[in-house]
Image (cartoon, rainbow, N blue to C red):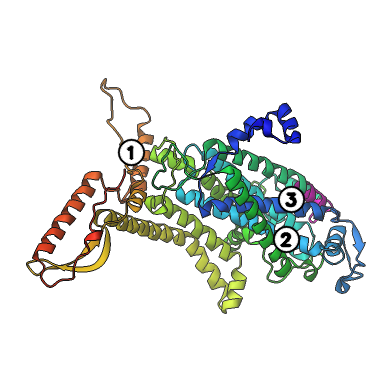
Amino acid sequence: MSEKDFPPPVKWVDDRLGIGKLGKKNLRKVFPDHWSFMLGEIALYSFIILLLTGVFLTFWFRPSMADVEYQGSYSLLKGLHMSEAYASTLDISFDIRGGLLMRQIHHWAAVLFVASMMVHLLRIFFTGAFRKPRELNWVIGFGMLFLGIIEGFIGYGLPDDLLSGTGLRITQGMIQASPIVGSYLTFFIFGGEFPGDDFVSRFFTVHVLLIPGLILALVTAHLFLVVYHKHTQYPGPGRTEKNVVGYPLMPVYMAKAGGFFFVVFGITALMGALLQINPVWLYGPYNPAEVTAGSQPDWYMGWLEGSVRLMPGFESHFWGVTLSWNLLIPALIIPPAFVTLVALYPFIEGWITGDKREHHLLDRPRNMPTRTGIGAAFITFYGLLWIAGGNDLVATHFGVSLNNVTWFLRFAVFIGPVLAFWATRRIAISLQRADTDRILHGLESGIIVRTPDGEYYEKHTPISNYEAYELTARDRLLPLEVGPETDDNGVRAPKRAITKVRARLSKFYFADAVQKPTAAEIEEAHAHGRHDEHEAVEGTTDTAELDESTSHEVTPHH
């Protein structure tokens, strides 16, 4: 459609804003097609659902801790004194038409938002989509995940029920463990001694204005960089570092995205209608003197609670200052260190490997064994801490000692990641060797051939050009070389010690990785295979007949 063919309203806007030229350039932008790319879309659509349902809930939620006597529809709590926040949550659940459905959709969307971002980041990590030029986008995405977890935790505390109050009490203890500033931060957040009188109103402002605004800004920057850098794609015929093979944004992806949004919205609404989540009326209002038996936070906070539960209780005293190591280490040292390491991983890997090139083709996880092993170690560490967050439930459900579960996890959280790294790395290397064998020798055909001297072997069928290209579309992994101590003029090379450390790390990173075969090795293997088959055909008298239609030569593209 030319600009003169625009409908009058569109032409009026185009004359003033120039949307025709802008749309012509961007609406035909090509994006690759793969199911794993939808993980990011699920996160985006969950965030949109959170905004829509959150607006509905703010109409009736009262962010106040003023004491009121409940006179609503839920008879089991009628006449009980509680905060306005908790009373309004009950009103939304029982007296506002569609209120409970909206509450549950909002909560399920929050769970889905965090889960989809986590899985999306794992896909990016294992396929190497964070490499240059996308390091900044990795940091932005990780920042969105961090803010999403904080946003979910704050929203979880707004109803002021007994379960959320228990979680806030644990959080208050972690904050107070901060040396020097702990007490000041506690008074600032809660407006006085816990639980204070102001935390609901303050949490509400942060929950509905500050963090959503930050996430929205990061989402905008994230999508802008995706368009600017162009989308990554998996290796395949016709796909290079300098092109994108896929479908245009308009009309293909706009139709797909629109339909997929309603799929995500529909499934989330179905979950909200049929699957109960956070029934605050069963817990009652928060009372600092009470605690909910078997209380658990939302799943994405479980690893933080697990680290606190695993830490032995001990403290130190220095110059009148008490350091509670049982909270300081698991709450204020381990989580920030873990988060910082993950956020900076693209820069760490780039420094170790010395890879400064731009990458638009994704890696198969098996082709980067060390990175895949590191990812498995991170997941194992996170998972063990997550299990530790429910060590009491593990003990009661399986009929084992709570102390035994705790001590087992204390050792497993250190040993498990190491074992996961080693096992995953060895599996990836084995898969690389299997791929190399497929490239060089093809697939097992099931046809047994006998040679003139009586030897039997199985004939291999060459793989297709498509598969051969996919298996060889990767770089050769070479560790960094230290280089000579001095240059031609006898001047000592600068930063020699750091260079040696970097070379050792690089050697470890690429150790045992199976390099892809060269063109000469492939040609030699295929020539050897043709020679063997030629001898077998001429010397065989009572073997199975060979299928000549499958004995063609394959030359993979490099």
Q: Can you see residue 169?
A: no
Q: Label 3, label 1: how many angstroms apart (C-alpha)?
A: 49 Å
Classed neighbour count for the residue bearing mark 3: other residues with Cα under 10 Å, few (<14), some (14–19), many (≥20): some
Which segment is the magenta one? 193-206
Q: Is residue 15 above or below residue 349?
A: above
Of residues 33 and 6, which is closer to you in this image? 6
Q: Is residue 156 above or below residue 211?
A: below
x then y, percent, for residue 146: 62, 49
* Eye-nearest disc, 2 or 1: 2
The earlier-in-sequence mark between 3 and 1 is 3
Q: Is residue 338 left or right of residue 539?
A: right
Q: Label 3, label 2: how many angstroms apart (C-alpha)?
A: 11 Å
| Label 2–label 1 contact, CB within 8 A | no
Classed neighbour count for the residue bearing mark 2: other residues with Cα under 10 Å, few (<14), some (14–19), many (≥20): many
Q: How many marks?
A: 3
Q: Which residue is mark 3?
A: 51
Q: Quadrant of residue 541?
A: bottom left
Give the amino acid type for the residue marked by disc 2 in the picture.
Ile
**Element assignment for label 2:** helix
Q: Which residue is mark 2?
A: 105
x then y, percent, for residue 300: 62, 58
Of residues 292 and 29, which is closer to you in this image? 29
**Element assignment for label 3:** helix
The earlier-in-sequence mark between 3 and 2 is 3
x then y, percent, for residue 121: 54, 50
Q: Which mark is residue 480?
A: 1
Residue 329 lies within the magenta run? no
Residue 205 lies within the magenta run? yes
Give the amino acid type for the residue marked by disc 3 in the picture.
Leu
Q: Quadrant of residue 394?
A: bottom right
